[in-house]
Image: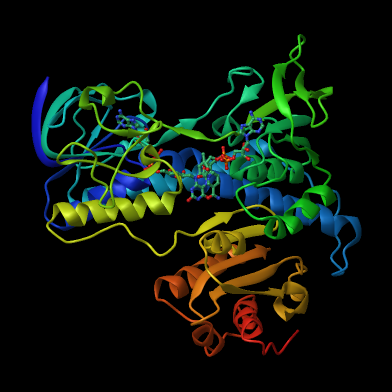
Amino acid sequence: MESLSTQLLVIGGGPGGYVAAIRAAQLGIATTLVEGGVLGGTCLNIGCIPSKALIHAAEAFEQARHQAAASPLGIRVAAPQIEIAQTVQWKDGIVRRLTAGVGALLKKAGVRVVPGWARVIDGKAVEVQGPAPESAGTGGAAATPGARIACEHLLLATGSVPQSLASMPFGGRVISSTEALAPQRLPARLVVVGAGYIGLELGMAYRKLGVEVAVVEALERVLPVYDEELTRPLRASLQRQGIALHLGCRVQGLNAAGDAVRVQDASGDAVELPADQVLVAVGRAPRTQGWGLERLMLDMRGATVRIDDRCRTSMRNVWAIGDLTGEPMLAHRAMAQGEMVAEIIAGQRRRFTPAAIPAVCFTDPEIVVVGRTPPEALEAGLDCITARFPFTANGRAMTLESTDGFVRVVARRDDHLIVGWQAVGRGVSELSAAFSQSIEMGARLEDVAGTIHAHPSLGEAVQEAAFRALGRAIHV
Ligand code: FAD
Ligand code: NAD
């Protein structure tokens, strides 16, 4: 077995790990990254990117069907069809381009990439066992399987895995998001368990591809992490699209024939939901098992590795970032943590104290949440003004045939400091940058109201929400 040594050893080449490795190498730190699967991690291979590709394809198909039915725009389309295997190939092409790009970036930065599964020996050494067959895309400067690597700093970035249900484990008809993102054939009927991010993003995409979809959620609301006002347009859209919602329900498993999900509904009655496939999307669990993490005896917070505001674990020079460290399990959080850890190791003074981490749910309509929602502001004891500007009063939204939804601002009553932005509507994910910047830069309502926003654009609703909060809306 080859012996290697490095200053920084990163386990996991997802958005957290690969960004940390690139930044560290840029700062002159000798860096080695071990990846057992494919570079890019969950995000590029089986998460953010493939899901958004599938959502886009489903939307394009639905648009074609919408225009074929009775186009108000005067477009004539005849009986559109979808070849799902080709859609998946197209999606795989995007994934390949991006993962190869990550390999190239690591190489350019001078990171040594070792394909294979790392096993922790102690806080200063790991052993890498042979690469998985699918790790062809790992690329990198020097692929060295079967190595023992000694390091000064160890960065844990192993990500997360789909959570399973004891009553309905994965296998056969019961699939996770990974399988749902690579269908070779579409099921006639899909039951989705969990009305969170994955369940709704993929459930809606499947519906637009023509699948009959039923969603089962344990709580009383869809996307229960967000407030009722924000999710109301989404709920209406789910109904319009013909997605059956079963809220406040308990899933009990498959029936004896294996072709229906047994559910206890909100009033305690037993119901069977016919299913050719069942997508279980009830959250993700940090990947803490099977790679020797327990040898480090780190302090944990529940099932996640406990970190402080510099992403330090309880062991000196052992760092952890991304999904392994718990919520919010978002790619941009993992990347920001990775970049910060690299800079701290290089001697910079950094802390992970973002004013806000944006969250976007890519449903139809999309939902963006940055900073505090009105109920969260109330809970924090803040006296706030809240104002909404509806897309029904926005010209650009009308030209896009998407007037559902609104932009909402939450600001302190005393000094008008903006503490939160939320939006629901088609295409609002792109407003997240403006929202995050305004909060991170400490903008007040007057700053946004006094900024000229391009016309016609959805962004005008951002300025108008600020106007409205100041009691001087123009267009509503
Ligand atoms: P991961 O991306 O999980 O990467 C961990 C890597 O470590 C993997 O490549 C794995 O193979 C490797 N690894 C694990 N153990 C070892 C070991 N012992 N040795 C070597 N390698 C190892 N987030 C968003 O922000 N926006 C979205 O739109 C979004 N959509 C999503 C859609 C889906 C369907 C899913 C499942 C997730 C989505 N996420 C989204 C979440 C996002 O993918 C994760 O938050 C992000 O990938 C976490 O990054 P990470 O670096 O912590 O871990
Ligand atoms: P989630 O936490 O978003 O939603 C899980 C849902 O399942 C919740 O509504 C929960 O109440 C419900 N649930 C839990 N147990 C249940 C049960 N036994 N029966 C019925 N319902 C049950 O989790 P997810 O959708 O699996 O996504 C996992 C993570 O991946 C997210 O938390 C997010 O961090 C990340 N993600 C992000 C995006 C994005 O940023 N657009 C997209 C997809 C995934």
Figure quadrant of residue 169: top right
For this view, does 450 lie left or right of residue 7? Answer: right
Colouring convention used in this rendered image of the protein: rainbow
- The front one of 162 and 18 is 162
Name which residue lies at 32% across and 44% down.
321
Residue 74 drawn at (x, y percent): 87, 69
Q: Is residue 78 above or below residue 377?
A: above
Residue 289 drawn at (x, y percent): 36, 23
Name which residue lies at 40% across and 71% down.
440
Q: Is residue 152 above or below residue 271?
A: below
Residue 145 drawn at (x, y percent): 21, 26
For this view, does 164 lie left or right of residue 103? Answer: right
- The front one of 474 and 299 is 299
- The front one of 171 and 78 is 171
Q: Where ligand 2 lies, by image quadrant?
A: top right
Q: Is residue 21 above or below residue 26?
A: above
Name which residue lies at 79% across and 41% down.
210
- The front one of 299 and 449 is 299
Q: Is residue 250 above or below residue 468?
A: above
